[in-house]
Amino acid sequence: MPLNEKKLLLNVSKHSKTALYRQIYQEIQKQTIAGELKEHEQLPGMREMARMLDVSTMVIDMALDLLIEDKICYRRPKKGTCVGSFVGQDSRSNLIVVYSRSEDLEFDSVMKPFLTGVGSAIHQENRTDMLYVSGGNIEERLRHIAADKNTKLLGVIIIYPDHLEQVCRLAEKFPAVKLVLLNFNYETFEMTPDNVFGVFNDEFCGGYSVGNYLLTQNCRRIGLIDYHVNNQNYQLRIEGFLKAHKDFGLRHDSDLAITTDIEDKVTSRGFKAMEKLLQQGRVDAVFCINDLLAAGAVEYLESISKRHEITVFGYDNLVPDISFSRNASTVAINTALMGKCAIKALLTPREYLCKQILIAPHLIVRHHHLDIKP
């Protein structure tokens, strides 16, 4: 007997903290797994379900869309929504394209962790294929894919493009394709087209975590090593670090902030900055804006046999050997979770309605500095 000819009992409460459409989704999913709803059985019409549950048709539509996205239900033309998966519904293969400006994405030590995070998330889905494109003309590649009737393009994940303008142009030429940026944020990101989304590292949170950790270890004279670069993400790291001081009722000593020369290699800059920093007097710890600067700072401390007197923090951990070999602490970007969120944003978009998602990094503390005198 069709469900629209009998009562569909769903335990839905308007007083629950769970959204109504999610409750409906969960109830139908549960009854399908339990066998209470049979495969190919037809659900009541949208208006009838809305009347039965005393909710709006928009709520029903959102619940049904989510059920269809997750292959719990399918739609039959002129018949309505049915339970189960329908083989004839869509025989095309599902494809997600991963693009990076790097010519050798698989061998790029900085980009590879993001590719690994995305690849692991896709592998867990078991219903989506991945095509990665490194370098080359992504626009031309997308045109070929879009023209392939055997392929359903679910979206494109872009790892750290050359310019945000490049992404905007791509989004305007492919308005039906969802583009997800992965890695670092952009100052004007909110102004991008509606089909552009982002999963970014929470840079402010990372800088704040370093400052908070060091201050709770009773460090008060904390050096800050940066270098001249127009990078909003680095600036957010610094702002988070300074905010931690403010929350402790302290002001960071400007004499302990060193901006390095841009001509040298990054590790050499860290080496020279650490030397200059110690000329300012006692230093309890140092926060370097990335791991390369931290490696240079540690190298200088080792050269003067003071490595174990000062805690050094870097940032990124995208090339773990840099900080690990120098036994430096660092802020690790959660590339695995970022990749998972990017895939979920493409496969279940109704669960990711926001323009951007910020993923908090975590601290890797390799050198504890606990014997600080006020």
Image (cartoon, rainbow, N blue to C red):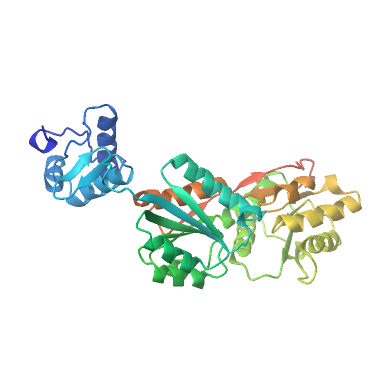
Q: Would residue 271 be seen by someone viewing this image from the given angle?
A: yes
Please give the name of the residue rendered at 45% of the width and 69% of the height, measured from the top-left corner.
170
Left or right of 261 on screen, residue 213: left
Estimate the x, y position of residue 143 in percent, counting from the top left. Answer: 42, 66
Residue found at the far right of this picture:
304
Q: Position of residue 8 (x, y in %)?
A: 15, 34
Residue 223, visible in the rendered structure: no
Picture quarter containing residue 147?
bottom left
117 to 246, vertically: above or below: above
Q: Residue at x 57, y 68 (%)?
A: 162
Q: Residue at x 27, y 48 (%)?
A: 65
Q: Nearer the viewer, residue 278 or 101?
A: 101
How many numbered badges does the structure rendering display? Answer: 0
In front here: 93 or 38? 93
The residue closer to the viewer here, 342 or 127, is 127
Q: Is residue 162 left or right of residue 41?
A: right
The residue at 55%/47% (across/down) is 117
Residue 144: x %, y % from top left:
43, 64
Residue 215 image point, x, y percent: 69, 48
Q: Is residue 92 above or below residue 142?
A: above
Q: Is residue 359 left or right of residue 44?
A: right
Residue 161, placed above or below residue 312: below
Q: Quadrant of the N terminus?
A: top left
Residue 198 is left or right of residue 374, and the answer is left
